[in-house]
Amino acid sequence: MSSDLGEFLRSRRARIGPAEAGLPAGVGRRQTPGLRREELAAVAGVSIDYYTRLEQGRDRNPSVAVLEALADALRLDDDEREHLHRLASGRSTPAGGRRPESARPGLRQLLETVRPSPGFVLNPGSDILAENPEGLALLPGLGEWPRGRRNFVRYMFRHPAAREVIASWPRMAQDCVAHLRTIAPDQAAGLVAELSAVSTDFAALWRDYDVRVKSGTDRTFRHPSVGRLDLRSEVLSVADGQRLVVFQAAPGSPSADALALLSLAARP
């Protein structure tokens, strides 16, 4: 965990310039992108020796006060701040609980309730634990994969249909990888290694180290059967880390009519 903390600190430090931190730019060409270690330590009010030990993984017990000072100095947003504390504490999941392996019964019931809106139940690592028929129909080819292979991030980067059907693919890809960064590294390690080996796009986004919890946003799909779908994703998270993701259309819109057609086609 300490090496992960150091990687995160280095990535954030590289993104903050002296001016943003309230420091003079100095003279001469800077060889280090962003802030130098000694500059960040000064802004955060810690010694350069102590900060260096944190980055190098030689100090594993930073206090909450130190973490908050670093978060302020690095201008972290709420998701990044939570990620910093999680890396330092070694918590295994965002909720501190056990990684679930089957969808909660209540969330399965909600999948039926929201029809004809496509819906999915995901675990923290974006494994698809359950989906309604419209969910399978929305993502062509997903139903051909066995249950253990169905993962939203994997579909984004490994299924050839993903870039065709998801018109907002670049933004959704960024959001998927940024959300994957919010879970414990040991939970994501296998998927990260797999996707890094086969997708240069994933590897580049992973190196960017954006950290962002997924929330509702607008998504556009180009479905081969029903055409354009302008949908709004909504995310409902529960205590054990599972989340219900639903894609809705505005009532009375052409996309609502298209969803109705998608639902008819998805019926057995």
Image (cartoon, rainbow, N blue to C red):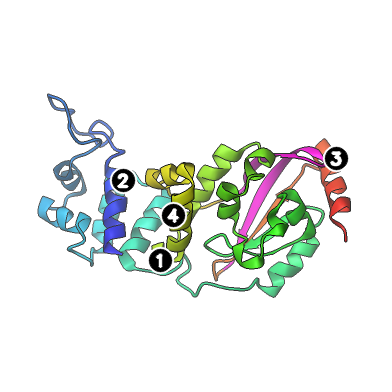
Earlier in the chain: of badge 1 and badge 3, it is 1
- Which quadrant holds the N terminus? bottom left
**Of label 2 and label 1, which has the lower sequence position?**
2
Closest to the observer, 35 or 156? 156
Residue 236 tag number: none
| Residue indicated by mark 3 | 252
Of the two numbered discs 3 and 4 on the same chain, state the one appearing first in sequence: 4
**Badge 4 is on which residue?**
181
**Is mark 3 in CB contact (under 8 Å) with mark 4?**
no
Q: Nearer the viewer, residue 24 or 83?
A: 83
User: Are circles 1 and 3 on residues that touch, CB within 8 Å?
Assistant: no
Counting from the top left corner in percent of width and height, residue 220 is at 68, 38
- Residue holding disc 2: 11
* Residue 109 magenta: no
Give amino acid for label 2: Ser
Residue 62 position, x and y percent, is: 23, 63
- CA gap, disc 4 and disc 2: 13 Å
Quadrant of residue 19 within the rendered picture: top left
Under circle 1, the secondary element is helix
